[in-house]
Image (tube, rainbow, N blue to C red):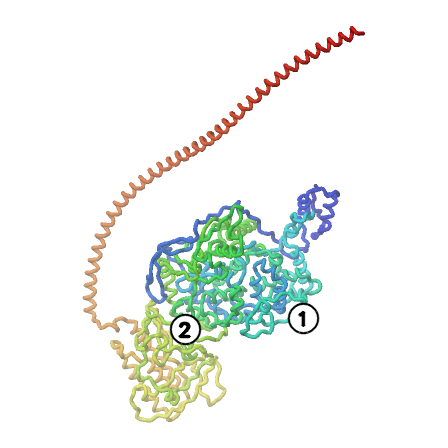
């Protein structure tokens, strides 16, 4: 009708909607123009307009990609059968055990092949190095945000009034789960997940296996939809925001393509931000959540309240009472008051709540903040549109875990995630990770999200135990057990164990979308296929690989060697650096990955495994894991097994830790231990330290009378100390470690003093070992009966502080370090830390001087009794030296002399440790015998080399012959391929000619029929022509006769007149 060009002097917010339609109506006064032409004029006049005066950062919507324009390759079957040999792998054992073989179901793409030896980039493996990465003490990583004030009342109102809309959008159960507070959950499991996240594969490593949060897992724990319209966060420009399409009711102005509440929601955000006080003018992307709540709710609904699982709507129910639909899901009642402000209607209230729900519970970016980019998705959900929220949330989770696991330092800005979903995933896959109260049967029977179970749950605060589970879950099998396949209640039971086809019916409809149960199966299929997870926010696009075939056991299948089934993204070289890709290419790639992930009607078939299906891991894959990560798994398992053993001990009797270990073991925050348990030891491990002799067993009463009262730390764990019987180990059997030269000391029967080979005591801590009298130690009475007057030593956590009491004993001397391992005694490449503690001497008196001389003699004899060729003389040296040094400290020996004897004893102890590492001290053999053994072994080796040379020559001849045969086979194969190509061409030509001939035959038959029909028509036409000629001739004769008669009559008439 007309072409409109925007004037240069027109304000950015003009023309208004009323002005646009007035101009269009002037051009069409009769109302005869087509509706589509009017809408095109409207769209043309929107170009360049900004209704909000540049308040929002605008970015266009993702382009629409048609399924007909893109072709994706899908296999015929997503679950195939392979002949596999399954195995088991223990991190502390040296080989993979074969447990069986047979035909197994695997998830495509996969095969039983050998992978190249991989490199470990896990954060937990880097933490085992000399300069580990440790969490800051004040880190809030993994902390779940509690609901803001007023959220609970708002959520209850929405669940009451808009239940049908939320169910149509598929988020009713997910919104219901946000009623509860998950902010009290500990963060140990979050740190464990980040430390064992493999960013290159998108999985967690648990022992020798991989697990990950799949789309079906996320849907089970959160209730978020997997299938639906693509989820994107943006504020589109006016030409897309106010774009109109023809309406069904025939309105000549059409209807908005986007939800009508979306512009109103943007206007409300803009007005609320401008009217709020002390908000930065430039940072308009986010808004405090409490400001957003106050702009919608009345004042009396802004208080905070705690929601309990047994009484979600505050009906006054007691714990244990049965829930019904009236108490768990009450509907709108007549006396229910509207909680919104006067200028807020019901539709705007629903959209505002969904924006708050998305920003603070589903996809949080900052603590207690709301971002304007989620208003589009909130508006779509408020109209009942189903959005694919689960893929976007999972992409965000994968990217944050990648960022943290690949960081060079953990002193980074704490990212916010929906940690409650990850904790619920851990709760389902790690039995025993969280202790939860019993969930009401009402929620279990109706399939509510599993995150509800964590609303009143507790878990371990011990990061050491969590790390040990990830390194070697077999060692904590009494506390945690791994669950691979979840029982998805939403899947139809009659289809479990059957093959389902993703097809299209005769009307072109997707067969998996014809019913609600089929939609659940369709979402399960989407979660089984590899692809890309996309999360778009503004101009940024996040792409993370999704490879469920690496965790086939979570779907009830066997795990083989997984292939990369992700498609190539056109125009993108590095999916981790999408910011370097042009904007148009970036958006096209995002739209394409969404289309590929949610595609249906492919014709492929897949199997829904039974909940109790048997699964396993192939022997080939476990062998690859052992070659690639075996050393790191064994190292980590040994380190954290020792630490978990120490959790039940008093602080002073634990192993000494250095600065690096201090930050790792204790620097995880001021988290106290809240659970108790034991560690299941590896049967392959043996003690490196001989058990304490029988004569060290003294009754507790004698210890109380004669024991030295050493100062211990006030920090204690409530875990119970495991005994040798609990650990299923005999205290008399030696223990040996076989990990790359490192040795691990084991506990004795009574004096349990574990050693951490990487550090020392905490500053100010002392050993809790008690002192035994020499008569008890050597089982012989002394000449003089001794009565000990012991004074407790005051040891501060700060070395510079001293006691204010002049009568109190002196603190630890600063003339020698607290760490008992001096540079001269630390063995290179040897895992050694002295077990002899540092003692604090008490003031001497006249009665203890002679006893000190006697103790010097005992110490001299003890050191002199060490025989390098007699291992029996090493037994009990550490415990005996520790007791004698303790008596030294109690008798008030001089600090310098005490330090001298401590250094001597540690030097002797280091010699014993070094002697233990020598094999010649354990085997009675002489040098001549070794020379004879070397000679015999050399003879055997020479003979073996000769046989190897002969075998190599035979192998060369066989290979040469095989090469000639292979060349001949290649030639024959090439000839056969040429012949086959010619045959195929001839067959194709023959088929082409046959098709042409058949077409000509059909045309000939059709033309013959037409010819026969034409002949019949010609005969009929000839007969009609003959009859017509006869009639013409007859009429001509009659007309002649008529003329004659007329002439005669005329002649008669003339005669008469």
Vertically, is 691 above or below 846?
Answer: above
Vertically, is 799 above or below 590?
Answer: below
> Is mark 2 in CB contact (under 8 Å) with mark 1?
no
Residue 76 place in picture, x, y as percent: 44, 49
Picture quarter with the N terminus: top right
What whole-number distance in Å separates the C-alpha atoms at marks 2 and 1? Answer: 52 Å
Quarter of the figure with residue 1051: top right
Mark 1 residue element: helix
Residue 452 place in picture, x, y as percent: 53, 67
Vertically, is 399 above or below 1028?
Answer: below
Indicate which disc residue 370 carries.
Answer: none
Drawn side of residue 472 relative to residue 362, left or right? left
Q: Residue at x 25, y 45 (%)?
A: 961
Q: Which residue is mark 1?
A: 300
Q: Circle 2: is it few (<14), some (14-19), or many (20+) Cα within 10 Å? A: many
Vertically, is 982 above or below 741?
Answer: above
Residue 449 place in picture, x, y as percent: 52, 64
Q: Which residue is mark 2?
A: 643
Residue 221 place in picture, x, y as percent: 51, 63
- Of 303 and 11, nearer the camera is 303
- In front of the other: label 2 or label 1? 1
Instruction: Answer with mark 2 or mark 1, whichever residue precedes in sequence.
Output: 1
Q: Circle 1: is it few (<14), some (14-19), or many (20+) Cα within 10 Å? A: few
Drawn side of residue 957 relative to residue 425, left or right? left
- Of 878 and 492, nearer the camera is 492
Residue extending farthest to the front is 1056
Q: Is residue 139 visible?
A: no
């Amino acid at each position: 009708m007309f072409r409109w060009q925007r004037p240069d002097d027109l304000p950015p917010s003009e023309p208004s909607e009323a002005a646009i339609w007035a101009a269009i109506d002037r051009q069409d006064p009769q109302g005869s123009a087509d509706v589509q032409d009017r809408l095109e004029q409207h769209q043309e006049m929107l170009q360049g307009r900004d209704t909000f005066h540049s308040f929002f950062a605008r970015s266009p919507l993702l382009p629409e990609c048609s399924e007909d324009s893109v072709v994706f390759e899908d296999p015929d079957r997503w679950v195939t059968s392979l002949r596999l040999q399954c195995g088991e792998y223990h991190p502390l054992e040296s080989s993979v055990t074969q447990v069986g073989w047979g035909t197994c179901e695997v998830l495509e793409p996969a095969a039983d092949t050998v992978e190249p030896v991989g490199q470990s980039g896990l954060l937990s493996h880097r933490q085992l190095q000399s300069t580990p990465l440790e969490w800051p003490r004040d880190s809030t990583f993994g902390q779940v945000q509690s609901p803001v004030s007023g959220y609970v009342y708002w959520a209850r109102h929405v669940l009451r009034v808009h239940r049908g809309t939320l169910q149509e959008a598929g988020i009713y159960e997910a919104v219901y789960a946000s009623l509860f507070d998950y902010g009290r959950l500990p963060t140990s499991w979050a740190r464990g997940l980040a430390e064992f996240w493999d960013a290159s594969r998108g999985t967690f490593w648990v022992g020798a296996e991989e697990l990950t949060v799949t789309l079906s897992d996320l849907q089970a724990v959160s209730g978020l939809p997997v299938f639906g319209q693509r989820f994107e966060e943006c504020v589109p420009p006016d030409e897309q925001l106010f774009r109109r399409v023809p309406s069904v009711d025939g309105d000549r102005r059409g209807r908005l393509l986007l939800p009508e509440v979306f512009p109103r929601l943007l206007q409300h955000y803009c007005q609320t931000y401008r009217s709020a006080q002390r908000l930065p003018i430039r940072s308009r992307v986010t808004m405090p959540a409490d400001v957003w709540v106050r702009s919608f709710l009345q004042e009396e609904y802004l208080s905070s309240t705690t929601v309990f699982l047994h009484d979600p709507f505050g009906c006054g129910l007691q714990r244990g009472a049965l829930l019904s639909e009236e108490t768990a899901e009450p509907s709108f009642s007549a006396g229910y008051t509207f909680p919104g402000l006067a200028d807020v209607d019901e539709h705007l209230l629903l959209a505002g709540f969904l924006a708050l729900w998305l920003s603070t519970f589903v996809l949080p970016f900052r603590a207690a903040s709301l971002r304007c980019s989620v208003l589009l998705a909130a508006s779509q959900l408020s109209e009942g549109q189903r959005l694919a929220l689960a893929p976007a949330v999972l992409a965000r989770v994968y990217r944050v875990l990648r960022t943290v696991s690949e960081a060079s330092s953990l002193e980074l800005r704490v990212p916010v995630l929906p940690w409650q979903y990850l904790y619920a995933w851990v709760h389902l896959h790690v039995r025993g990770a969280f202790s939860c109260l019993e969930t009401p049967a009402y929620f279990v029977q109706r399939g509510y999200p599993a995150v509800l179970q964590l609303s009143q749950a507790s878990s371990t605060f011990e990061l050491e135990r969590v790390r040990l589970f990830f390194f070697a879950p077999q060692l904590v099998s009494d506390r945690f057990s791994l669950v691979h396949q979840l029982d998805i209640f939403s899947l139809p039971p009659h289809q479990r164990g059957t093959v389902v086809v993703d097809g299209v019916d005769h009307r072109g409809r997707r067969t998996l979308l014809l019913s609600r149960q089929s939609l659940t199966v369709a979402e399960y299929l989407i979660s089984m296929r590899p692809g890309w997870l996309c999360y778009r926010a503004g101009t940024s696009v996040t792409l993370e690989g999704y490879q469920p075939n690496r965790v086939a056991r979570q779907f009830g299948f066997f795990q083989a060697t997984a292939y990369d089934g992700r498609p190539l993204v056109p125009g993108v070289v590095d999916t981790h650096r999408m910011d370097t890709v042009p904007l148009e290419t970036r958006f096209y790639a995002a739209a394409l990955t969404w289309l590929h992930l949610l595609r249906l009607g492919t014709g492929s078939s897949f199997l829904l495994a039974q909940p109790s299906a048997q699964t396993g891991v192939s022997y080939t894959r476990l062998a690859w894991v052992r070659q690639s990560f075996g050393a790191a798994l064994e190292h980590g398992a040994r380190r954290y097994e020792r630490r978990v053993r120490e959790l039940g001990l008093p602080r002073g009797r634990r192993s000494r830790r250095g600065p690096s270990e201090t930050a790792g073991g204790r620097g995880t925050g001021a988290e106290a231990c809240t659970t108790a348990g034991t560690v299941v030891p590896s049967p392959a491990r043996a003690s490196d330290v001989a058990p304490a002799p029988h004569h060290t067993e003294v009754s507790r009463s004698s210890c109380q009378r004669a024991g030295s009262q050493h100062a211990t730390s006030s920090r204690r764990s409530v875990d119970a100390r495991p005994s040798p019987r609990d650990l299923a180990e005999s205290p008399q059997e030696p223990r040996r470690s076989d990990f790359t030269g490192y040795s691990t000391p084991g506990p004795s029967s009574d004096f349990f003093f574990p050693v951490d080979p990487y550090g020392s005591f905490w500053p100010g801590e002392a050993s809790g070992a008690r002192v035994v009298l020499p008569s008890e130690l050597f089982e012989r009475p002394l000449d003089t009966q001794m009565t000990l007057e012991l004074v407790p030593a005051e040891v501060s956590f700060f070395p510079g502080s001293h006691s204010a009491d002049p009568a109190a004993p002196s603190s630890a001397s600063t003339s020698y370090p607290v760490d008992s391992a001096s540079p001269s005694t630390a063995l290179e490449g040897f895992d050694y830390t002295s077990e002899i503690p540092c003692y604090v001497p008490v003031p001497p008196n006249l009665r203890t001087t002679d006893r000190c001389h006697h103790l010097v003699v005992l110490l001299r004899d003890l050191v002199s009794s060490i025989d390098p060729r007699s291992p029996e003389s090493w037994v009990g040296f550490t415990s005996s030296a520790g007791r004698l040094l303790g008596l030294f400290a109690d008798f008030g020996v001089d600090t310098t002399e005490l330090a001298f004897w401590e250094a001597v004893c540690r030097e002797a102890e280091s010699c014993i440790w070094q002697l233990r590492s020598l094999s010649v001290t354990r085997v009675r053999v002489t040098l001549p015998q070794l020379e004879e053994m070397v000679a015999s072994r050399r003879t055997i080796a020479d003979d073996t080399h000769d046989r190897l040379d002969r075998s190599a020559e035979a192998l060369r001849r066989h290979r040469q012959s095989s090469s000639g045969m292979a060349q001949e086979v290649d030639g024959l194969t090439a000839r056969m391929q040429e012949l086959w190509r010619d045959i195929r061409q001839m067959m194709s030509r023959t088929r082409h000619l046959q098709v042409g001939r058949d077409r000509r035959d059909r045309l000939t038959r059709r033309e013959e029929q037409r010819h026969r029909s034409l002949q019949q028509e010609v005969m009929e036409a000839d007969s009609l022509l003959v009859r017509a000629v006869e009639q013409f001739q007859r009429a001509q004769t009659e007309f002649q006769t008529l003329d004659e008669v007329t002439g005669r009559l005329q002649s008669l008439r003339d005669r008469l007149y």
